[in-house]
Amino acid sequence: MTKGERGGFKVKVKSGSSDGASPERSRTGSGRQIPAGDLRFASPSTSDRREFPVDKKQRNDFELCCEVSKKVATKYGGRTQAIIYPENERVVVLVWTAAGIIENGGFRYLFGSVLPGDAKCAHTIIALTRIGCVKAAEIVQRAVCLFPDCLPHRYDVERIRWYESQPEDIKVLLDTEFLNELDNITTGLAKYIRELGLDKMY
């Protein structure tokens, strides 16, 4: 299981770093392509252990989240607007897709991508809160609030330019803090899926 192997939205991500280099790309469970290898802000211990969870329950949770998210996205269409999804399913695909993007390349990749119907990450923040990951939701909110009035620019080029102009230490901190919440996100989302019976529906 590769790092960031998560099903969800089919998102378009601006590849390459600010210096024009093109990172390698990894294929996620949904078939979408996300740039990988630009984990400049992730601590190695955090990112490495995500490649294949050692704990059996954590591994089962990870696989459950991948499977359900992929099936939900396939059912409703990978580019369907977030608001079109039924509320419970929207939580699954938004959480798993956003987590996969950030895991692959930090918030730079999140703001360089297009989450259908959630460019301002408002639904994603709500979704993280719904699964009990309040800290992760707060981290996303802090990242969003690096933009004027907490409103990311409409166009991806402008979003990336603004985000990359922010202090490096702040970006490093946000990425590292979110990566350290990935296990909690996996556990919380798996619990959410089971409690709502989504594992039986999909």
Image: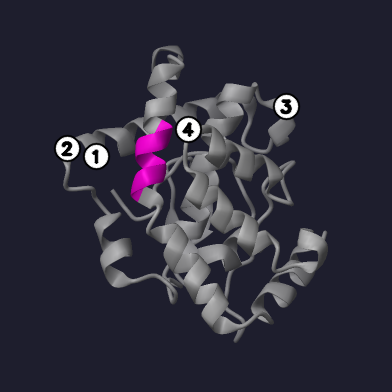
Residue drawn where x is 63% and y is 30% of the image: 77
Front residue of 176/49: it is 176
Residue drawn where x is 32% and y is 39% of the image: 62
Disc 1 is placed on an element classified as helix
Q: Nearer the viewer, mark 4 or mark 2?
A: 2
The residue carrying pointer 3 sits among few (fewer than 14), some (14 to 19) or many (20 or more) residues within 10 Å by Cα, namely few
Disc 4 is placed on an element classified as helix
Secondary structure of the magenta portion, mostly?
helix
Residue drawn where x is 62% and y is 61% of the image: 142
Q: Which residue is mark 2?
A: 56
- Mark sitting earlier along the chain (4/1): 1
Q: How many marks?
A: 4
The residue carrying pointer 2 sits among few (fewer than 14), some (14 to 19) or many (20 or more) residues within 10 Å by Cα, namely few
- Mark sitting earlier along the chain (3/4): 4
Amino acid on which disc 3 is placed:
Ile
Residue 163 pos. (x, y %):
68, 73
